[in-house]
Image: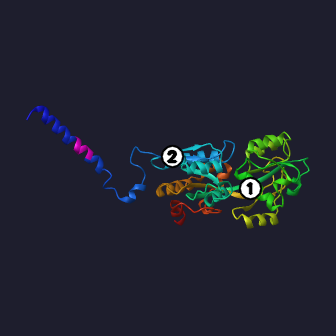
Amino acid sequence: MSKKLIAILLAALLLTGLVAGCGGSGGDKAEGDAAEPTKEGEKIFVTIATGGTAGTYFPLGGAFAEIWSNNISGVNSTAQTTGASVANVNLLRNGEVEVIFVQNDIAFYAANGTEMFSDTKYEDIKGLATLYPETIQIITLEGKKIETLADLKGKKVAVGAAGSGTEANARQILEAAGITYDDISVQYLSFSEAANNLKDGNVDAAFVTAGFPTAAVQDIAAQRNVKILDVDDALADKLIEKYPFYVKTVIPADTYNGMTEDVNAVAVMSMLAVSSDLDEDTVYNLLKTMYENPERLKVAHPLGAFIKAETGQDGMSVDLHPGAEKYFNE
């Protein structure tokens, strides 16, 4: 047999051994091991959809990304600025992100195919945890002669961007107060647009759904005396009877410059959501490490102090992901 032929045969045998070795590396692995942290050198990428840089989602999302990247082996997490709740649901649906910030009412609409998701029901959205109240703040200025919700009739009112969570909140609260969009001059404006137009006198009042203090409202209060309209118990009860994802809350005096009294309000809950197909052990580890690093959350934003395991299911409006359910059951 020629030396050349022997060399070819040896090469073929070596190649066969390598292929068999590669194929066998995963064959002995138990089925449950698939959810374990990745093999050395591999990464799990966890992108978090947050909101605008001026809101509360973005700094908290950055804290989550840091906590998860530093404390879970194999995880590489980043926070991404987005258009917030509604946009985040669509990013999750499209597989572009792994974790989203979302209001509990928006998650409810998505899971049930109502409001802005009436034609695009998304049953695979699952809850990770609720975080803190997002208060619907109804802002006006001193001198506008607006003391109650009833005084909004005939006024220019910023209700949030068209199709946004804020817009749905505004419409539902006005409905409970017996006011329709026909009774006001509706202005579909985002947070920043509403703030600028309120300062400039182009609108008379604005709805803002966010954890307080909100940077956009602080900016207005630094230049003008702001007034936040009260949502009394009777109105809140009527609203909650129809829309059970709302909760009562109080905006304390001195939250904003010039506020001298507490104001009754209603809120939805900020929450984290994931897709049903995200790995169960990964979800469990995300939740566990998040709750094990409370100080980092407090540094990121004052609302980080509200993020606690014991309140992580308060106001949960969709089914929990099995990984989150496992954590809370423990």
Is disc 1 surrounded by few (<14), some (14 to 19) or many (20+) residues within 10 Å?
many
Q: Report helix, strand or loop for mark 1.
A: helix
Q: Is residue 18 magenta?
A: yes
Question: Is residue 101 rendered to the left or right of residue 262?
Answer: left
The type of residue carrying mark 2 is: Ser
Q: Residue at left 47%, top 55%? A: 279
Instruction: Return the residue nearer the eye: 63 or 21.
Output: 21
At label 1, which amino acid type do we have?
Answer: Asn
List x then y, in percent, for residue 98: 53, 50
Magenta-span inclusion, residue 112 = no
Q: Position of residue 327 (x, y in %)?
A: 52, 62
Q: State the SS at label 2.
A: helix
Residue 15 higher or lower than 36, as above or below: above
Above or below, comparing residue 196 to residue 319 in the picture: above
Looking at the image, residue 145 sits to the left or right of residue 21; the answer is: right
**Could you say which quadrant of the image residue 109 lies in?**
bottom right
The chief SS type of the magenta part is: helix
Q: Which mark is residue 169?
A: 1
Q: Magenta segment, which residues?
A: 15-19
Determine if residue 210 is in view.
no
Q: In front here: 252 or 190?
A: 190
The total number of labels drawn is 2
Residue drawn at the location 41% of the way across and 49% of the way down? 38
Q: Position of residue 220 (x, y in %)?
A: 80, 43
Marks 1 & 2, CB-CB < 8 Å contact: no
- For this orientation, the residue located farthest to the front is 119
Disc sitting over residue 69 in the figure? 2
Q: Quadrant of the N terminus?
A: top left
Q: Position of residue 128 (x, y in %)?
A: 57, 57
| Residue 203 seen in render | yes
Q: What is the CA distance from the residue labelled 1 to the residue labelled 2? A: 35 Å
